[in-house]
């Protein structure tokens, strides 16, 4: 019976787009969490805008430890979905949720003890250090909810049902926007909390998103088929297997965002305006990255399913088609941003001096996507197929050269646009390593 079902699964361009679009939309809506924080705080002042950049990236370092594990969990479940071993998906989901909850508690404790001294030591501005610590104190309370949401996302992507991610992201973004408006500026009996209000709003939005996932899963998912909340317990062997798969992506993501944090610390020493400029550029860069993330994740999940169905020869064609469509979708948006830089920048701040100072950096960042698109797309595909070690090696090699370049460039110039040329080094290095790994073809024999 299985031999008559498997060949009917067709993964052409239409299927790739149908997988990628809801992923992109959900990532976009989630990106609006950070974008709305920046947009609201950009009306408060440069200190708050810059502090949100530093503490936001610090939070991402913590967040990506859990997300890295969830990417490995996703590749494992996708392979089991292709093999039609549905009960194993549920066991993996439960094991992953348990690990992610424990990890979130540990990271909250680490943050409480380290964040204050860290910002005080590394920030040139005392005001930026204090505001960064305040934001992070309230933001880390959202980690348990965000990690469990990542486990649900991994499940829905793995079983090729990403459409629900759009609805969950809408719920999260609407919650965040309403709370940002009420908590940052104050509303009625609610006092104006400033940067702390932005962090609280984001943490509550994560909790609301988790409630949405739980309710939807109980009402709409065949829980008996997948045994998401019942069945035989996950043994230590499965825990070890998932950790062995996810650890490389945990290292990869944490290392990449740690490099980004060091980049922002280097920019912070150039002044509060360059830091505000970099925060805005980061938000626009992250928005464009949604295309790469969406198509790369979709094709990685499809490729892992194909491997589970014993159809490895079809993987290169899927990967090529996904890259072509991703590039074609991004070019028009990048051209619009390049033609109307002031209009794009005004979305994030009303400060004229920041808009004027950001234009050159915006063009440098846009140019870097000529190297970012193929490199980072292949990174997401590679990780989604379970090639976690290869993806991690590429990221760490790129981050090392990236940091060396940053320390060299900030010693000779204070121009933030020139400092942003470090992105070219990162993408070229990662892309070269990933291309070599892909050409070697070890993914064909990778067992999960």
Image: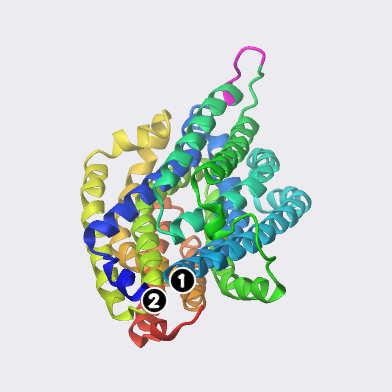
Residue shown at 41% from the left, 53% from the top: 161
Q: Is residue 369 magenta?
A: no
Which tag, 1 or 2, sits closer to the chain's start?
A: 1
Residue 148 location (% of width, % of height): 61, 51
According to the picture, the residue beneath numbered tag 1 turns out to be 79
Marker count (numbered): 2
The image's mark for residue 307 is: 2
Residue shown at 62% from the left, 75% from the top: 241
Residue 167 location (% of width, % of height): 44, 39
Where residue 289 sits, quadrant-wise, is bottom left
Q: Residues within 10 Å of mark 2 (few under 14, many from 20)?
A: many
**Considering the numbered disc 1 on the image, is that residue within a helix, a strand or a loop?**
helix
Left or right of 158? Residue 121 is right
Q: Which residues are magenta?
A: 184-189
Residue 314 location (% of width, % of height): 28, 76
In depth, the one of 432 and 442 nearer the eye is 442
- For this orientation, the residue located farthest to the front is 1
Q: Residues within 10 Å of mark 1 (few under 14, many from 20)?
A: many
Q: Main secondary structure of the magenta part?
A: loop
In depth, the one of 25 and 353 nearer the eye is 25
């Amino acid at each position: 019976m299985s031999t008559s079902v498997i060949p009917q699964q067709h993964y052409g361009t239409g299927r790739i787009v149908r997988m990628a679009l809801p992923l992109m939309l959900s990532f976009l809506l989630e990106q609006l969490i950070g974008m709305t924080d920046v947009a609201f705080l950009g009306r408060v002042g440069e200190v708050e805008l810059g502090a949100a950049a530093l503490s936001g990236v610090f939070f991402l370092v913590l967040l990506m430890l859990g997300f890295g594990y969830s990417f490995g969990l996703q590749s494992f479940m996708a392979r089991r979905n292709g093999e039609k071993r549905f009960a194993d998906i549920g066991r993996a989901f439960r094991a992953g949720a348990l690990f992610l909850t424990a990890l979130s508690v540990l990271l909250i404790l680490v943050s409480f003890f380290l964040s204050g001294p860290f910002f005080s030591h590394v920030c040139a501005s005392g005001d930026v250090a204090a505001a960064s610590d305040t934001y992070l104190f309230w933001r880390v309370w959202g980690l348990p909810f965000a990690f469990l949401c990542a486990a649900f996302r991994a499940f829905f992507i793995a079983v090729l049902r990403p459409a629900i991610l759009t609805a969950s992201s809408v719920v999260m973004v609407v919650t965040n926007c309403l709370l940002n408006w009420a908590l940052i500026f104050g509303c009625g009996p609610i006092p104006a909390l400033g940067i702390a209000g932005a962090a609280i709003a984001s943490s509550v939005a994560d909790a609301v998103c988790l409630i949405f996932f739980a309710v939807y899963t109980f009402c709409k998912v065949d829980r008996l088929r997948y045994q998401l909340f019942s069945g035989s317990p996950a043994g230590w062997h499965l825990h070890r297997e998932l950790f062995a798969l996810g650890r490389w992506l945990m290292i990869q993501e944490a290392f990449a965002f740690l490099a980004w944090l060091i980049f922002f610390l280097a920019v912070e020493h150039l002044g509060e305006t360059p830091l505000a400029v970099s925060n805005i550029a980061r938000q626009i860069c992250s928005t464009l990255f949604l295309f790469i993330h969406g198509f790369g994740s979709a094709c990685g999940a499809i490729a892992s399913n194909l491997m589970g169905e014993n159809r490895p020869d079809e993987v290169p064609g899927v990967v090529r088609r996904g890259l072509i469509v991703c590039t074609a979708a991004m070019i028009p948006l990048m051209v619009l941003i390049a033609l109307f830089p002031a209009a794009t920048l005004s979305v994030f701040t009303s400060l004229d001096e920041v808009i004027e100072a950001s234009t050159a950096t915006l063009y440098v960042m846009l140019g870097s996507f000529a190297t970012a698109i193929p490199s980072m797309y292949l990174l997401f595909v590679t990780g989604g197929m379970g090639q976690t070690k290869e993806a991690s090696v590429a990221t760490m090699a790129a981050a090392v050269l990236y940091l060396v370049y940053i320390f060299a460039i900030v010693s000779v110039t204070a121009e933030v646009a020139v400092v942003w040329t470090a992105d070219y080094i990162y993408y070229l290095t990662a892309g070269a390593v990933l291309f070599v790994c892909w050409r070697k073809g070890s993914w064909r024999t990778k067992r999960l």
